Amino acid sequence: MELASINIVVKDADATLKTYLKLIGTNNIAEVIKLKGLKDDSETVDGYWLKTRPLAMAIFTPRSTSGRMGDFLQKFGQGIHHIQFHMGQDEFENTYEKYKNMGWPVSRPTYYGKLSEAVFWLEESAPPGVPVKFATKAYHTLKMWPEVIYLDTPQRFEAMEIKEQIIRPRVDIKTPVVSVQDFEKQTKVWAELLSREARRKEGGDKPPVDDRRGNQFIAHMYEFANDSKISVYHALNPEGSIRKTLFRRGKESMYYDIIFHIQRDQTHELWRQWEKAGFDMVDPKPLLNTGQGNGNYFFFIHPLSTHGVVCEFVSLWNFPRDKSCEPYMVFDWSDSKLFMVPPDVNEAH
């Protein structure tokens, strides 16, 4: 199981694509695939699949107000709708049966004829409380074939030629954040869903995380081999925006924001570029996190600028690969050009 993409639902996919090309930079996007008439068991959508690293981003506009995404857009407006996992076909079939046997509500699998791909949904009414999509590239007949909906879809798909070149320093789409009410229950649910324990835990016995936006929260992070992560947050203070948004929607769980990682020594330059491009910067400048020896820069762009998506930017870091040690943040200097002390000074120690 590999976390593959973050998927947003919007009113106008074309306008949203232009926004995210301007935000991420065309040099940080390997390919843009245009999708027309992508259908599943619930609805038909149009949109774009952006091949970014390490997670892809999908932008969808539903054709009707019914269905999973159409209903979401009507109730809550634009924003993050679901995440998608990719897996081998055998694991896909076993995962489908596992959730069914656990009593978790899953959709009938859908087979995309033109792509030879199969998908199924873990419904929003399942214990995680948010929609989750699973997909595979089929290489043999599906064992659950009597349950599968076979569709000649999408109606059309093509790789787009992006003529306008927008150059940005390195930007990685790294982490979807899930905000929850019952933290103890939900961390167990996500461990069950992902078949792994949290790699990093913030808060708890330590002081809660303070984002300097009036939010104090505890968090668990679930790590994947492609250096992406899922963070499960529980806001402690009811007056903060994270908790308020959850209560306003009347939800136990919701996708709250996307964390992008940016090049450390280009943090201020990126901030200036985005401000000049017309994005609504929440902060007057990038902030340096001094809590728990973190040392990362971070800042936010207001969701009014990004079609309902809260975008958080953090200077690049990673967890050490040695799973036996206590998790800590390791700075990533791989794309850095300017420095006084060379990063490889650490390689000899």
Image: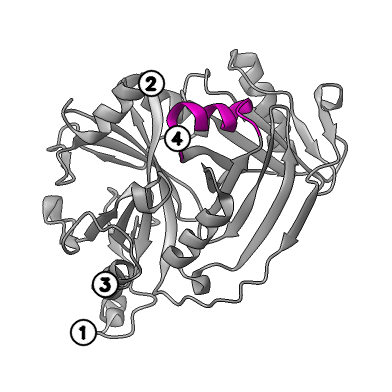
How many neighbours does mark 4 have within 10 angstroms: few (below 14), some (14-19), or many (20 or more)?
some
Residue 91: image location, x then y, percent: 68, 36
Please state which amino acid type lies under the numbered disc 2.
Answer: Lys
Tag 2 residue = 251
Give the mark nearest the N terminus, 4 or 2.
Answer: 4
Tag 4 residue = 77
Quarter holding the C terminus is bottom left
* Front tag of 1 and 3: 3
Please state which amino acid type lies under the numbered disc 4.
Answer: Gly
Q: Is residue 221 visible?
A: yes
Please state which amino acid type lies under the numbered disc 1.
Answer: Val
* Front tag of 3 and 2: 3
**Magenta stretch, overall SS:** helix
Residue, x 68% and y 23% (percent of image)? 107
Residue 294: image location, x then y, percent: 18, 56
Tag 3 residue = 272
Marks 3/2 in contact by CB < 8 Å: the verdict is no
Tag 1 residue = 341
Task: Indicate yes or no whether the magenta region holds residue 35.
Answer: no
Q: Is residue 183 visible?
A: no
Distance between the alpha carbons at the discs numbered 4 and 3: 29 Å
How many neighbours does mark 3 have within 10 angstroms: few (below 14), some (14-19), or many (20 or more)?
some
Residue 197: image location, x then y, percent: 41, 34
The region drawn magenta spans: 64-78
How many neighbours does mark 1 have within 10 angstroms: few (below 14), some (14-19), or many (20 or more)?
few
User: Would you identify the image quadrant in which residue 271 lies?
Assistant: bottom left
Q: Secondary structure at mark 3?
A: helix
Distance between the alpha carbons at the discs numbered 4 and 2: 15 Å
Distance between the alpha carbons at the discs numbered 1 and 2: 49 Å
